[in-house]
Image (cartoon, rainbow, N blue to C red):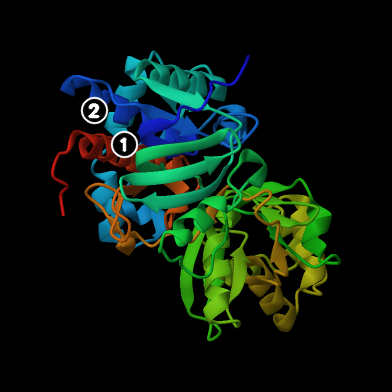
Amino acid sequence: MTMPSLPERADILIVGAGAAGLFAAIWAGRAARPEGRPASIVAVDGARKLGAKILVAGGGRCNVTHWRVTEADYAGGTAPAIRKVLGRFTVDDTIGFFRQLGVEFKREETGKLFPVTDSARTVLDALVTAAGEAGATLVHPARVHALERTADGFRVATDAGSIRAATVILCTGGKSLPKSGSDGAGFALATSLGHSLTAPIVPALVPLVLPADHWIRGLSGLTLPAEVMLLSARGKRLVSFTGSTLCTHTGLSGPSVLDISRHWLVAREADPGVRLAINWLPGEPAESVDRMLMSAPGRGVLAVLRERLPERLARALCEAACAPPTGDLPRDARRRVVQCVTALELPIVGDRGFTVAEATAGGLPLSEVRLETMESRICPGLFFAGEILDVDGRIGGFNFQWAWASGFVAGSAAAAACRGDAHTS
């Protein structure tokens, strides 16, 4: 299949044809058509495989959204700003949109919504078809190298040639999963036009790494519910997440760890003394576990722990606490066991990086964008949507919902700009 040629001009040029870019293209086309002459909409993407992030999301099933989404599920920009954008295109709107395209969802116990086909390809194909029906031309692989403001819009240099556009929507993603095309190039395009970036910009939803000799790495493959806590240098709990936790050959992963990863990476920039701790019995405070151990004299700590925890972990905790697994448990050893069970400090030495991270923490500040339109406050005619912005959600479909909502707003507003409608300030 040959790549469509790049036209010399377009009313709306969308850089990046992932979730946010395809959604922006769809709604730009739908918003422009009722006014008579359809707008010329072109979406260019540098990735060899279109929609790579969509295809790998949710283990290849694509967790399209969550049944309940609020601003509390996100970090980065301020809660009121995030809420304002999310309110423009809700979960119900997402369900209705895909239903019109023939894609039905099922809700799992976690609240995640997946296509009933259990195939991400269903979602991507529906989006690509809808973009085409809306009048958008998709050009890929065509990496954008430069974006220049001109008197009548923008001049854009790509692998497929140059194109002039009246308006541009940047939907390039952040820096996560660079093989999918989101390698940070969009940040350079934005800053070349006067925008700034938040600091730090770090991986989000990323597995964390423990020292090579740490005993948790020896439990690779073990999965169980746990609470992971971010503590200040003085021991104050800053944030915590409870959920499935996976011990890996390099450290820890699973929803609880992925969710807290961005908070640890960002916090340590301001306070190197922050640390992570884990409670292997979520909901059980130290006092409760202490009573549990004291109420079973003579049974041995291993026998007590393996009633609540996998045996491999129970034995490892006894060893970590230097506690005898059987027989009487001295008071000091009991205290060490309680500490290891309910507040084991995790000496994290790093993360797996952007190559495996599912999202990016940091990006273009929302303060530099008009939230009613997602248009730049610095460069008129330039719009933004998706992960390039300083918004990242926890695991569960929240980042996709941000892509749908911001893509809807940006695409609709770009079409309005082409029609000459007054922008909302």
164 left or right, relative to 405: right
Outermost residue, bottom side:
234
Q: Which quadrant is the N terminus positioned in?
A: top right
- In the rendered image, residue 235, in percent from the top left (x then y), is placed at 53, 82
In the picture provided, is 37 more to the left or to the right than 348? left
Characterize the local packing of mark 1: few (<14), some (14-19) or many (20 or more) Cα atoms within 10 angstroms.
Answer: many
Q: Is residue 163 left or right of residue 274?
A: left
Q: Quadrant of the C terminus?
A: bottom left
- Residue type at the position of mark 2: Ala
Q: Do tag 2 and tag 1 residues touch (Cβ < 8 Å)?
A: yes
Residue at 25% x, 46% y is 373
Q: Secondary structure at mark 2?
A: helix
Within 10 Å of the Cα at label 2, are there few (<14), some (14-19), or many (20+) other Cα atoms? many
Q: Amino acid at mark 1?
A: Gly
Residue at left offset 47%, top offset 60%: 192
Q: Is residue 258 in sight in this rendering?
A: yes
Residue at x 49%, y 25% (from the top left corner): 138
Question: Is residue 119 visible to us here?
Answer: no
| Element carrying mark 1 | helix
Picture disc at residue 411? 1
User: In which quarter of the view is residue 401 placed?
Assistant: top left
Q: Earlier in the sequence, mark 2 or mark 1?
A: 2
Q: Which residue is mark 2?
A: 31
Q: Is residue 409 above or below residue 338?
A: above
